[in-house]
Image (tube, grey):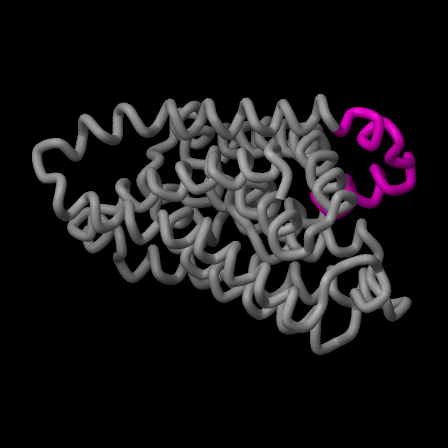
Amino acid sequence: MSLLATSITAAVALVMMYTGMSVSPRRLREILSRGDLKNIAWLAAVNYAVIPLAVLVFAGAGGQISGLGLALLILAVLPCAPLVPSLVALLDEAPEWAILVFIVFSLVSLVGVVLLTVLLDAGGYIAGAGQPHGQDLYRGLAGYLAAVFVPLLLGMLLRVFTGAWQQSLLRVLRPVAGISLLVTLLAFVVVNRTALLGVSLRDMAIIAAFNVFCIALVFPYRRAAGDRWLAGLLTTGFRNIALAMPFSIVVLGSSEVPVYIMVYVLAALVTCVPAVIGARLVQGRG
């Protein structure tokens, strides 16, 4: 891996460690009421069944999946960006449920990326596309899981054993993780600016349409979701780029796919902001 790829992966590892340290078993038990389980279930069904299947049908229609199709598939199985709880809090909503969803979905995504890797290899979708396959693909997957999910478990253990130092560590780790991720992603944009500017308008439109599709699946469920609706909207609309970027780099070893994922970030900002504004207007009328 290049220095930039290693830096992005290390920054994501810090984010996952912070996530693990944020897990409070007692608080999770308090939040996990019957209603919360129902809301999480329908949100998981949308994000781990409906969206991935729809994208797979679209991306795999021609047999071999393109770089854009791979990017959309990765994003499809990785919902809920780390910034979602913070966005929910900024919108004057209680962030606890969004934090719970982020933690649960981070763990479920472990299964999602394994299944995606098996599918890509077994289906022969990426054979000849300049992407690794067979042993190389699974070696990359093992490295990805070690770099991303081991820090999550380590963070959980640190919460248990740090005791009185826990809150102090969290206060330090949160800005360090967030700034590290932001800086490395900005560095990626600078290094790959020519490739980013070279993305066609057609591909940009497809990425934006994917994001609109994700939002549209959740938007009608305002009454059913109640006060969980806004968190669900952001969870589905802002896919987890923090997990998607290292997957495309470490597992696929791709230089093309991460570029499309960065384009998605811009598309998500363009589509999600109006969606949130519309959500608040609807909530105001309701």
196 part of magenta stretch: yes
Identity of the residue drawn at 52% across and 54% down: 144
Quarter holding residue 95? top left
Q: What stretch is highlighted in magenta?
A: 192-211
Identity of the residue drawn at 36% across and 48% down: 151
188 part of magenta stretch: no
Quarter holding residue 61? bottom right
Q: Residue 281 at x, y = what percent?
A: 56, 28
- In the image, 120: left or right of 3? right
Q: Is the magenta stretch mostly helix, strand or loop?
A: helix
Q: Identify the residue at the far bottom of this view.
A: 122
Q: Identify the residue at the far front of this view.
A: 2
Q: Is residue 246 visible?
A: yes
- In the image, 138: left or right of 192? left
Q: Is residue 46 visible?
A: no
Q: Residue 6 at x, y = what percent?
A: 55, 39
Residue 2's place in the image compared with 113, above or below, is above
- In the image, 58: left or right of 51? right
Relative to the observer, which residue lies in front, 60 or 286?
60
Q: Residue 109 at x, y = what percent?
A: 49, 58
Identity of the residue drawn at 54% across and 47% down: 243
Numbered label tally: 0
Residue 21's place in the image compared with 138, above or below, is above
Image quarter where the N terminus lies is top right
Quarter holding residue 74? bottom right
Identity of the residue drawn at 57% across and 28% down: 184
Q: Residue 13 at x, y = what percent?
A: 43, 42
